[in-house]
Image (spheres, rainbow, N blue to C red):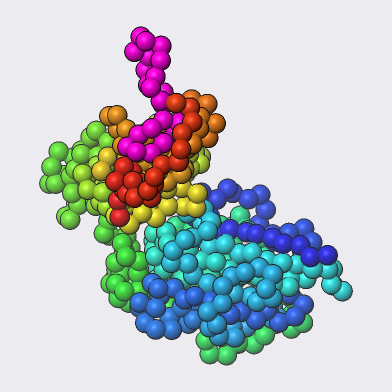
Amino acid sequence: MKKLGLVAALLLLAPRVAAAWTYIELTHPRWGTPFEIELGAPSADLEGIAAGTTEAELQKAIDDWRFVPCAEVPIDLVGQSGAAAILGDGKNVVTFYESDWPHDFSFVGMTSYETDSCSAGWCMVEADVELNGVNYVWTDVRGSLPYVNARSILMHELGHALGLGHSSVSGAAMNPRYTRGYLFIADDDVDGICTLYPREEPRICEGDDCPFGLSCVDGECRPATRVPCTTHNDCAYDERCNEESGRCVQEAPGGDAIGHPCSSEADCDEGILCEPVLGRSICTVPCDGLTPRSCPTGFYCERKATAECGTGYCAPVREAGGGALGTPCETSSDCGSLHCADGICTTPCDLDAPICPPGLVCHADMDEGCGACAKPRPLGAPCVDNGQCDGELCLDYRRGGICTAVCESHDDCPAALRCLAEGGARFCLPPPKDDGCGCQSTSPGGAAPVVLSALLLWISRRRRR
C-alpha cells in the first residue's frame, strides 16, 4: 500500500516544533534502494552567476549528507534531465520554478514523497523537490531574505527526501526557520541521519570530503577553523567582510543603524536616510517595495512610505502576525505576509508585471499606486480592470466599473442582479433605482447580443499589462 506525503520549508512563519530531530512520519521510512536524483529546471539566478552553478550547488548539498562519517546515505546525482516534478512518475526530481509557483508564496521549497511497505517496514520510493524562484532570489553566497543560499536550502529539502522531519534545534540544517546565512549539518542532524542510515564503522575522511562547515583533521571531520570570509563577495548582499575579524558583518543596511528617531540625516549613521515612516521620522534605508521581507531582521519594507510602487523604506516590526492572506487586518504587522492593504492581509504586486500566489489576482485599486494580491471579485463588485473579476469582465457602468457576465435572462444572474441591456448586449447588473413609476423598460428575456465578441472589446475595461 503506497502513501503520499508533503512537507514544506516555511521561512520565518514556521511554527516551532516540540522535539529535536524527527522522522518525516511515524512509519520511519527510509531508502532501501539508491536514491538517484535528476535536476529538472535549473535556477535562473544561479545560472546567471555561471553556467552549471545549479548542478554544482545541488552536488554540494548531496555531498553534505553523504559525507556524514557515521552514516551510509544512498544518494547520488545522475545529471540534468529537464524533467518536471510529478509525484508518481518514478523519477526523483529537483526543480526550480521561475513562474507559476504552485504553493504558498512564503514557501522557499516543497518536498513531496511517496512511501510503500517493504521488508524493512516502510521505504521511500520517490521524492520530488520544488524550489521557489518566483518569490526568492537564489545565490551561492550567504543568504539574507529575499536572497537564499542554494546549498543550504537544498540540503534542508534533501533531508526531507531522505526521511528527516523538522528539528527544533536552532542552527540545525533541518530547522524550518531560515532568515540569512548558511545552514550546516549540526550534531542534531547527524543524530537523525545516522539513526536512519547507520554505518557500521565511522568513515575516515580524506581531503575535503566533510560536510559544509567541517574540515578533515587526522581522518575526522571537525569544525572548520578557516575564516568565514576574505572578501565582501563571500557575504550576503547587505553585509560586508570585516578585515580584522574575517567575519561577515551587517553594514548596509544594519539592524543597529536603522529604526532610531531622527530629525535630519545628521542623526543617522553615514549612508542612512532620515525619512517619514508610519507617521514619524526614523533612520532607515530603501527596500524592495514588492518584497515586505527585504529588510534586516526586526524590520519590514513599508511600501506606502514612498509614492513609488517598487520602493519602500524599512520600518520596525517585532514579528509577523498570524493573519493569513485574505483575513482582516489593521496594520501590516497583523499579517504573516507583513502587508495589509484595504483592510486585508495581502502581498504587493506590480501592475505592469503582476505576479500573485495561486488563486489570487493583482488588484489595481487596493494599494495606492501599486497592486495588491487578493481573490477575484464576484459579480456586482466594483472593479477597474477585467483581471479583478471572477468572470474576467469589468464593465464601464454608470459612474464606475462593475464585475459582470453576459446573460440572456435574470436566471443567469445572482439574486441581487438583473439581466439588463447595456451597450448593445445584456449583462448581469444592479437594477435601476425606482424613479417613482414602478416600472422599467427592459424585459426579462431577450435575444443573444449580435457581434458580442466585438462589443466586448470596447465596453469592457482592459487589464493593465
Residue extending furthest bottom? 206
Residue drawn at point x = 58 percent, y = 80 percent: 38
Residue drawn at point x = 26 percent, y = 49 percent: 309
Relative height, residue 207 to residue 263 (above, below): below
Residue 436 colored in magenta in the image:
yes
- Image spot of residue 54 (x, y percent): 46, 78
Q: Is residue 215 in view?
A: no
| Main secondary structure along the magenta-highlighted residues | loop
**Image quadrant where one finds the N terminus:** bottom right
- Image spot of residue 351 (x, y percent): 31, 51
How many labels sit on residues?
Answer: 0
**With 67 as the anchor, is 28 left or right in this view?**
right
**The image quarter in which residue 159 lies:** bottom right
Residue extending furthest top? 436
Relative height, residue 281 to residue 18 (above, below): above
Relative height, residue 400 to residue 182 (above, below): above
**With 160 as the anchor, is 465 left or right in this view?**
left
Residue extending furthest right? 119
Residue drawn at point x = 67 percent, y = 73 percent: 89
**Image quadrant where one finds the C terminus:** bottom left
Magenta segment boundaries in residue numbering: 419-442
Residue drawn at point x = 35 percent, y = 34 percent: 422
Identify which residue, 426 or 315, lies in the foreground.
Answer: 426
Identify which residue, 42 or 417, lies in the foreground.
Answer: 417
- Image spot of residue 258 (x, y percent): 27, 48
Q: Is residue 277 in view?
A: yes
- Image spot of residue 323 (x, y percent): 49, 38
Identify which residue, 159 or 383, lies in the foreground.
Answer: 383
